[in-house]
Amino acid sequence: MAAPTVEESSTISDDFYAILNTRKEATSDELRTAYRRMCVLYHPDKHLNENDKRAAEAIFNKAQQAYQVLNDPSKRAIYDVYGEKGLEAEWEVVPRTRTAQDIREEYERLSKEQEERRIQQSTNPRGAITVGIDATDLFDVYDDYDDEFSGLPAIEVKSMSITQSIDAPLTTSDTAVLSGNLSTQNGNGNGSFNVSYRRIFSYQSWGEFQASAGGGPTLALKLFRNINKRTFVTCTGTSRLLSGGMIAPGVSVVGGRQLDKHTMGYLTWRWGLQSSMTTMVVRDTQSTHAMFQMQLGIPNSFVSTSFTKKFPEQEGKFTVAAKVGLFGSIFEYGCDKKISRHSRVAAKVSIGVPSGVTLRLKLGRASQTFLFPIHLAHDISPQAIFYGTVAPVLTYWLIKALVVDPFLNRQKTDEIVKERNAKQEQMEQKKKEAQAEVYLMEEMVERIIASEQAREGLVITKAWYGKLVVSEESASNGGCGSLDDLMDGVIDVTIPLQCQVKDSKLILTDASKTGLPGFYDPCVGEDKNLRVNYTFRGEPHECTIADSEPLRIPKKSHHIDPS
């Protein structure tokens, strides 16, 4: 199935909803009313001067285009998903009669397929470096028969491992994977090299053959099959050559079933040198992730559970977990935080018997992962637990305040400057269009103000739009001041807002105000606000809203004391 390829553009597109000042859920009657109001203001036949006529014609054409698109259900559905570029594309297979939801789902599916193809065309390198650190000398207490100072605590690297893998797509259905591992611990080293070949038979099944060398040659065959939409089965058979010439076979079968919208159940059976039967239930929602697992086997049996609270707005997670088994018990807690577009950091404290206290630090950058398990104490030590918890938090906030935040702010500033430079000519054109619109509004605004003053209605005394920053003196006077009190990146929108007043009411939707008649973007790429000073029934009012926040005035909460 084909759909139009809509590429991102650096051009500044018009917001059709903002042009008509209507909400995205507007009905046909609401659109018609908004369009008629624009016709009254900007119809070319209302102007005799040729320059005014040309300016009014340009504005009128934009309003007409916006109305024609939004009043057509199929065009509106395409515009809601793809924007103005989608209307210019050739839709050969996807019918225009489909609903917005259908097109949105189709777009998401095609985007996913395109991303999958992009990944298949790359080698998709993945790597992990693990550095095990022994810091038990900091917190463990030993009987020391020598009263003299024995020196600084010893902190040493006790293990290290490096893992790397790359994908090599052969066809759209065949992929080869090369991976390797090198590790050393307490002076002893080992390594392994793996080659695997995966073939996708259909959307329901695939198979993989793997050969590895290191610690004994091993062959493995894995098959996956979807039984139905909610159930799958994976079977794996392995054969490993031991040092004495013996062959150690192994079999594992994993069955999974979706129990409800957010819950999956798994049952795993393993046979070989280590045999076991494991059941696991995982529930994953937008705000939480929970897991319960139980295993009965040789040589180990255990019960484990974990719970993760997600914070989507902060792009972070907090996790607690516990495990009790024949080989000991362990309790863990930690957090995970996204610090940039491609980077995440995580810290976890593990408290166990007989393992003691371990701090696990993790840094992920794109497809590379760096792990630092730091063994703090052999026994459960309150000091090790306290410092293992507090030290990473303090370190994170210090690095964030001194390094990460300044870097991201500098990067954001550079991107804004780059975007402004790329759109400089378009911004100047939008500014001229807005000034022409304001000029055409002046006569109508005078009549609106006279009508509102006659009945003590709504009169906009002053309004600004952009990056609002007022001086301390202005802030102490209620936050309003002259345009000179404001920094660059602010425009006066008193006339455009007064032009929107009807029957002593001003209603703006939750769309960006940049697309409103008489507005333009004075600070591309930065957060913008709208501040309005107005009088209603002779009393002063004031309000400030975010760019994409709806506005409805007058309101009693906006009233200010003139004293």
Image: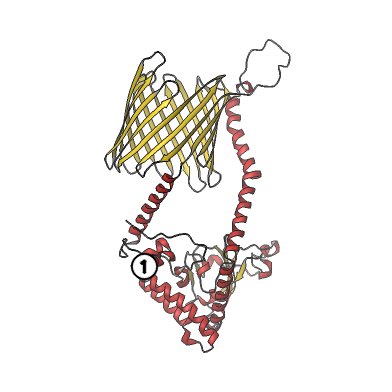
Residue 480 x %, y %: 64, 67
Query: Can residue 555 be seen in this snapshot?
Result: no
Q: What is the crowding at mark 1: few (fewer than 14 residues within 10 Å), some, or many (at least 20)?
A: many
Query: Can residue 238 be seen in this snapshot?
Result: yes
In percent of the image, x 41 and y 27: which residue is there?
Answer: 212
In percent of the image, x 64 and y 48: which residue is there?
Answer: 406
In the structure shown, which secondary structural element does the residue marked by tag 1 occupy? helix
Instruction: Specify whether 176 is left or right of 223.
Output: right
For residue 37, which quarter of the picture? bottom left
For the N terminus, which image quadrant?
bottom left
**Viewer-proximal residue, 102 or 323?**
102
Residue 286 x %, y %: 42, 45
Instruction: Specify whether 256 is left or right of 132.
Output: left
Q: Please, which residue is most extreme toward the front here?
A: 170
Residue 448 x %, y %: 52, 81
Residue 116 x %, y %: 40, 47
**Viewer-proximal residue, 478 or 197?**
197
Which residue has dot 1 on it? 75
For residue 138, which quarter of the picture? top right
In percent of the image, x 54 and y 65: which residue is there?
Answer: 557
Identity, as a three-letter code, of the amino acid under mark 1: Lys
**Viewer-proximal residue, 501 or 37?**
37
For the C terminus, which image quadrant?
bottom right
